[in-house]
Image (cartoon, grey):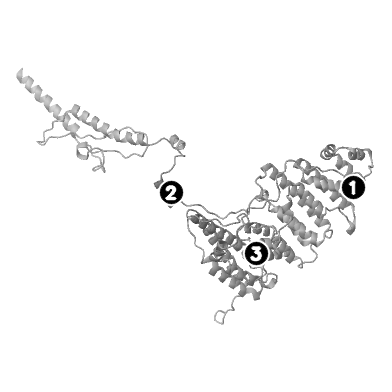
Amino acid sequence: MAGWWQAGGDTAALILSAGVQAAAAPIPLPGLRHSGFDHLLHRGVCRPTRRLCSPTSAPTPNLSKKPKFNSEGSESYVNSLDYLLQEKREQALEQEPEKLPMQDCPDLDSLDRDEDVPLTPEHRKLVERFSMSLQVIPSVHPGETMFLPRRQPPPCILDCSYLKPRNHLEGLFFSSPPAQQLSFLRSGLLSNLYLHALACPRPLLQWLFQLLAWPPETSSAAFGLLWDLSVDGLFRQSGEDAHMWCPELPEIREAFHSLGAHSPAWHPQAPAEHSGRVLTRAAGLSCEEQQDPVQETALDISLSYICKFLTLCALAQPGATTDANLLDLMELLCRAGLDVGLRLLPKTDLQQLLLQLLENIRQWPGKLQQLCSALSLVSDHHHNLLALVQFFPDVTSRGRRLRSQLSLVVMARMLNQQETCPLWQEKAQLLVLSRLLSCMRPSSLAQRLGSGPLPPCQEQPLPPCQEQQPRAGAELDRTVCYLCHSLLTLAGVVVSCQDITPDQWGELQLLCVQLDRHLSTRIRDSPEAMHWTALKDLAAQTAVRWQELLSCRCPRPEAGPLLR
């Protein structure tokens, strides 16, 4: 019995030893020799890398756990219960550092609620040291205050005291109050009454023209009837004796006044009042109240109706207006086009009207100097004057001539060079532009602006503070760049409107040299001053255009005998 037990014990020991060997046999894993899957006793505690504020992930299990062998080589397995307890303690130590970042990480909602926490002085100094203000050149001109907000349109009364009704319906219209007369207009009864009549009363046409300044529901009906009556009258007349009623300048001023134009806009200041503050005055609103989008849309619609009808009048009756009235009307329209509420709106109707009025001037180019002098005083801001130059497209010879001459006058006025430059000599425009380019050096402009006269809103100079000096220097730097950008754009307009002749090739080459000497090499671009980078890009583009123009217009040298 004892022998059998001993034999059975040896057999059991043999089976257990075989199982231990099978369990202890290492699984071959290529490439993981020095990886994180080794035994804890060989690699220490493994802490997986996790992102900050990431949710606690489940502990990574040990894929291969090697049994521990004793030094004598006996195949006795380590106590599995002690080993499991040790592994559990190590996993708990691995999870504790992962919970700490989650507790220290603030909630995103709490960050939004704590936005108004003041910065410490150290943090404020650090932010001011590395802060960068994005100073860019505005792409839209600031505009002028031409039209003030209006609460309701002014009364427009039809004067029919001298009119005799031709039928019962017309008599009913004449005797009706103003509100019912507007109902006649909106319902279409006036169209049936006068559209195919032999003659339309002049007071009715004047009344319809003044209604163009009313809200859109009334102005649209008035414009439709006024246009149909005028075109129908032109078609019914034969030959060159066709006559059409056209509003005079006082009537146009009255319509603009009904739109909200304030009286100071009609009386431009004298040139002496402008000369001392051209470089320092900032364009802004003259009133605290601004128009809402609904009123701006109504203003744009009314101005579009007025410009379309005046264009029809200029085409049908080109000689009905004197040159003096044409110049005053063009100045009035340019002032209206620079209104603050109309800056972002297209001005196609205004441009067409200005071109047609320009073609109707009889004494051309004798009135060019008077027209350019008047238009250059419409605004004190250089960007507004640049936008005014762009009101005249370069699609006609007179339009190109006016754009070029007006650009030179504006540049000379901005640089205080009106008396020193021969502005009114057509063949010397490129030479005058070359002289003005030498005055556009940024350092020269900064010196002029820094030592120039005071703006109108500041009567006495304020003592500079230490904290205000850097801000004042940055503002002066931006103002210089802004002015130089407008002047360089005007210089490009002057060259683009020229018909370069062979005797002007040397002048164009001199312009390229002056541009490179006084602007391209004098502009410093920096990531902290994007406005200077924009100016340098404009200078580079202008130089490329002038060089291309020079290469296309200049004659090429003849080929020698070898090339032939």
Position of 63 relative to 299 (above/below): above
Residue under label 1, please give it. Answer: 201
Disc 1 vs disc 2: Cβ atoms closer than 8 Å? no
What's the CA distance linking mark 3 and mark 2?
42 Å
How much space separates mark 1 and mark 2, taking CA atoms? 73 Å
Determine the secondary structure under disc 3.
helix
Q: Residue 349 location in percent, x, y?
A: 73, 52
Q: Residue 557 at what x, y percent from top left?
A: 59, 77
Task: Say whether residue 250 is visible.
Answer: yes
Q: Assign the C terminus to one quadrant of the image.
A: bottom right
Residue that carries the numbered disc 2 in the rendered image:
127
Crowdedness near tag 3: few (<14), some (14–19) or many (≥20) residues, C-alpha within 10 Å = many
User: Is 79 above or below relative to 115?
Assistant: above
Judged from the image, the secondary structure of the residue bearing numbered disc 2 is helix
Mark 2 crowd level (few <14, some 14–19, many ≥20, 10 Å Cα):
few
Q: Amino acid at mark 2?
A: Val
The residue lying toward the viewer, choosing from 111 and 240, is 111
Q: Picture coordinates of residue 414 (x, y %)?
A: 63, 63
Instruction: Note whether residue 60 is visible.
Output: no
Q: Residue at x 65, y 56 (%)?
A: 384
How many numbered marks does the figure carry?
A: 3
Closest to the observer, 362 or 43: 362
Write down the residue under mark 3.
Answer: 413
Q: Which label's residue is closer to the chain start, 3 or 2? A: 2
Q: Is residue 222 left or right of residue 541?
A: right
* Mark 1 and mark 3: Cα distance apart in space: 48 Å
Q: Is residue 224 above or below residue 109?
A: below
The quadrant holding residue 504 is bottom right
User: The disc labelled 1 sits on which kind of residue?
Assistant: Pro
Say left or right for 92 vs 469: left
Q: Residues within 10 Å of mark 1 (few under 14, many from 20)?
A: few
Quadrant containing the N terminus is top left
